[in-house]
Image (cartoon, coloured by chain):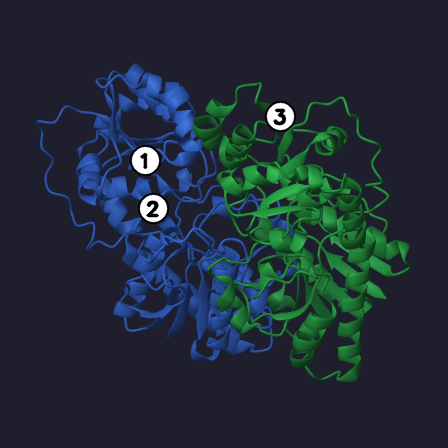
Chain colours: A blue, B green
Amino acid sequence: MKIAHVAPLFEAVPPRLYGGTERIVSYLCDGLADRGHEVTLFASSDSATRARLAPCRETALRLDPRPLTSAIAAHLSMLDEVRRRADEFDLIHFHLSHFQHFPFFEHCPEKTVTTPHGRLDYSDLPGALARWPDFPFISISLRQRRPLPAANWVGNVYHGLPLAHFPMPPPRSSSTEPYLAFLGRLSRDKRPDRAIETARRSGLPLRIAAKVGADDRAYFHDEIEPLIDGEKVVYVGEVGETEKADFLQGAAALLFPIDWPEPFGLVVIEAMAFGTPVIAWNEGAMPEIVDDGVSGFIVDSVDAAVARVGELGRLDRNEIRAVFERRFSAERMIDDYEAVYALLLADSAASPQARPRPFGQNIAASRVNGSRHAPPE
Amino acid sequence: MKIAHVAPLFEAVPPRLYGGTERIVSYLCDGLADRGHEVTLFASSDSATRARLAPCRETALRLDPRPLTSAIAAHLSMLDEVRRRADEFDLIHFHLSHFQHFPFFEHCPEKTVTTPHGRLDYSDLPGALARWPDFPFISISLRQRRPLPAANWVGNVYHGLPLAHFPMPPPRSSSTEPYLAFLGRLSRDKRPDRAIETARRSGLPLRIAAKVGADDRAYFHDEIEPLIDGEKVVYVGEVGETEKADFLQGAAALLFPIDWPEPFGLVVIEAMAFGTPVIAWNEGAMPEIVDDGVSGFIVDSVDAAVARVGELGRLDRNEIRAVFERRFSAERMIDDYEAVYALLLADSAASPQARPRPFGQNIAASRVNGSRHAPPE
């Protein structure tokens, strides 16, 4: 299959700094290339991939030392380049969230598919979607679809991590004092305050590994820093990949007390890769990602979270790792994407003039669906 | 003439808050409508115009109380709407800076003209322009063109203010103590520090009327606030329109010590409307806007600015007002835009299939040019 992937230009693929989208695009392109597909990745020149790189900008926008860049113009140029080369591909897979590609491919939406990697409850999206209703979309969780029910959803593919990067973890050291873990940005909607309260009340120490971004400095300073005592609540700063592995594997549980419609939550499956259970608040994709009572617990309050900390002993870390391998490997993710691609190409071949909407929306969404835990929509 | 104007959706037209672009679009649409043109303004619904309003979003993006908006999707929807209605217009005038409209009108660039209202030295613009070289552009100063010499420049039209909004000012009160004025955002590239040093060394007090935006708070706190003594350097806060008039008219001079390629500088011509001279640093469009020795002085250093403060007595405030009326009225601005429109329509009529570039670029740029002070490019 000849597939183009189009990544956002904000980060390199894979990202140098934070960038969940670019990590997933990287795994996907590498994995598809390894399976023998002809994969072309449109991304910034500082990307590294086993696919063919179509370099679209000297450096990623966020890594550019020049003070004045235009994300709008950079993406316009990239999209024009993709369009010029469109005949080289069977399918063009966009990883852009806000529909910049619609005017470029409105003559052939059936040749495209789009994975939006972010939340979709922006007030301007339904209006734009109504003008270009035919573009096929793949969600990263069923919950993500909720603000755009009218989109042409043709599949749901949960993210996955390469087993080669996340091998079976070594046995845990039994000497470490048990602790709860918080990992992620220290922003208001990640609710580190809930994590701190849960830890305090459950009697376990909390270790916070997180970056304090410029946007979050005031919140951190005013509301979180006073709660850090260096003993029961420890701030370990930002962690690199190796430290992250130790940090996650060593934890009794990862707390994920989010207060926003997180469409996926990569760190949750990272914890699972190390056999670490997750206590997640019932928001966004969490009920789809965490198998309640198996790979962790879904809770609605600090009270419930504290109670679940007391029940962590009944979860089997080997079983959590097994669930991770079954549900959240990159290999499974690539299988799912291949299945959606095959459906879309079959649709196109069956009726080259027809728009894929009626078929794709119903059949593909029910057939290609990584979830065994779909919440009622 | 049937003309569509397409405004950015960040602010209403005219703006509720700061928004130079939206002010100019407002004056232009009202003025063209008053002259009998059929003018349609694509803008947010909270706009108010004497043209026909084509409302494109419930509220301007910056005034929207909802936390999640998508500027990308909002502008895509507006541009699609403009394109659907394109047949209703002889010409479509875009006031967007970063080329979002290019993919929508690439089949008919000759039917469009674009006034970019901002600086153009963004690293991604030349690359995008090379992909869509035919779109006609109007600069707001010749200096603005410098980063994009290859653009299809068809005219240069300086901004103007309606004489009805800026009537001949009343005689000045002679009782006010003379002072120098600084008006604008307190950001690093507006260099309020230079204004303070100039005032200190010239012996005149400085009054600063300015907003401290979120981005500028640290700079203001660390570097400017310590220099404000409430006596020789007075911070009067943000001023409304009436206070602004008094503030500008009362000043011995407006200091404009910018350190960035300002493409126009509306406040400079506002000062001139009150007969107030401007001491401007030799950056951006300043040598084109300020007639050195007539409506103010162009300087390269604080030393030179201090020397020029001593020479303010030789400038005639009535003459400054006269220069304002001659060069920077909205009436003159609308004359200039009408002339560019006429040229573009003549080009289209003469060769309906031809792209207007070779003709427009050479003839129109030299014919329609509000500057008598073009700097060497």
Instruction: Please give the name of the residue rendered at 71% of the width and 68% of the height, measured from the top-left corner.
Output: B112
Query: Are discs 1 and 2 less than 8 Å apart at CB?
Result: yes
For the residues beneath circles 1 and 2, the answer to whether they share a chain is yes
Give percent across and percent down for residue A370: 39, 52
Chain assignment, label 3: B
Question: Mark 1 = which residue?
Answer: A211
Residue B95, compared with residue A52, is above or below; it is: above
For the residues beneath circles 3 and 1, the answer to whether they share a chain is no
Residue type at numbered disc 2? Tyr
Residue A185, compared with residue B287, is above or below; it is: above
Query: Are discs 3 and 1 less than 8 Å apart at CB?
Result: no
- Dot 1, crowdedness within 10 Å: few (<14), some or many (≥20)? some
Q: Quadrant of residue A169?
A: top left
Q: Which mark is residue A18?
A: 2
| Gap in angstroms between the C-alphas marked 3 and 2 | 39 Å
Q: Which mark is residue B237?
A: 3
Give percent across and percent down for residue B345: 79, 74
Chain assignment, label 2: A
Q: How many numbered marks does the figure carry?
A: 3
Query: Are discs 3 and 2 less than 8 Å apart at CB?
Result: no
The answer to whether residue B177 of the structure is visible from this angle is yes
In front: mark 3 or mark 1?
Answer: 3
Q: Quadrant of the N terminus of chain A?
A: bottom left
The answer to whether residue B99 of the structure is visible from this angle is no
Instruction: Please give the name of the residue rendered at 69% of the width and 32% of the height, measured from the top-left corner.
Output: B251
Residue type at numbered disc 3? Gly
| Gap in angstroms between the C-alphas marked 3 and 1 | 35 Å
